[in-house]
Image: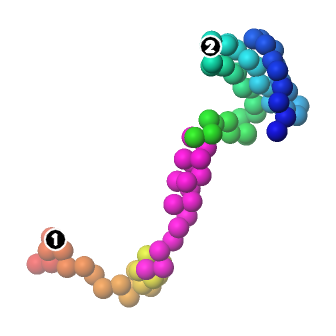
Amino acid sequence: MLVLSRQRDETIMIGDDIEITVVDIRGDKVRLGITAPSSIPVHRKEVYEAIKRENRDAARIDPNDLSRADRKLRGTEPEASGGGPESS
């Protein structure tokens, strides 16, 4: 890890496109301003980890769901008898 010291209104450059500026320092809190291209997502770490967790959970595929979807697409899924208007 690179550790740099900066004062208020001083900036750190990451590559040619990302600027991190110390906006304010109050007690033990530092406010940072980040300028980056819109193609680069910028999140607090806890938000980033939550996004990763949600994406990982959404990508999990239950084999039963796949089998059911396959049967439904092939037209071999038995219709559920729900007692709706079609079941007269």
Magenta highlight on residue 55: yes
User: Can you give x and y, in whole percent of width and height, for residue 42 in the image?
Assistant: 67, 36
- Residue projecting furthest to the bottom: 76
Picture quarter with the N terminus: top right
| Residue to which mark 1 is pinned | 84
| Amino acid carrying mark 1 in the image | Gly
Colour treatment of the image: rainbow
Q: How far apart are marks 1 and 2 (CA)?
A: 64 Å
User: Can you give x and y, in whole percent of width and height, for residue 76 in the image?
Assistant: 38, 88
| Amino acid carrying mark 2 in the image | Gly
Nearer to us in this view, 4 or 14 = 4
Q: Is there CB contact under 8 Å for labels 1 and 2?
A: no
Residue at 73% of width from left, 40% of height from top? 39
| Residue to which mark 2 is pinned | 27
Q: Main secondary structure of the magenta part?
A: helix
* Depicted 61 relative to depicted 73: above or below: above
Secondary structure state at the residue bearing disc 2: loop
Position of 57 compared to 19: left or right? left
Where on the picture, by quarter, is residue 30?
top right
Residue at 11% of width from left, 78% of height from top? 88
Residue at 43% of width from left, 76% of height from top? 65
Where on the picture, by quarter, is residue 85?
bottom left
Secondary structure state at the residue bearing disc 1: loop
Asked whether residue 69 is in view, the answer is: no
Q: What span is colored magenta in the figure?
A: 47-64
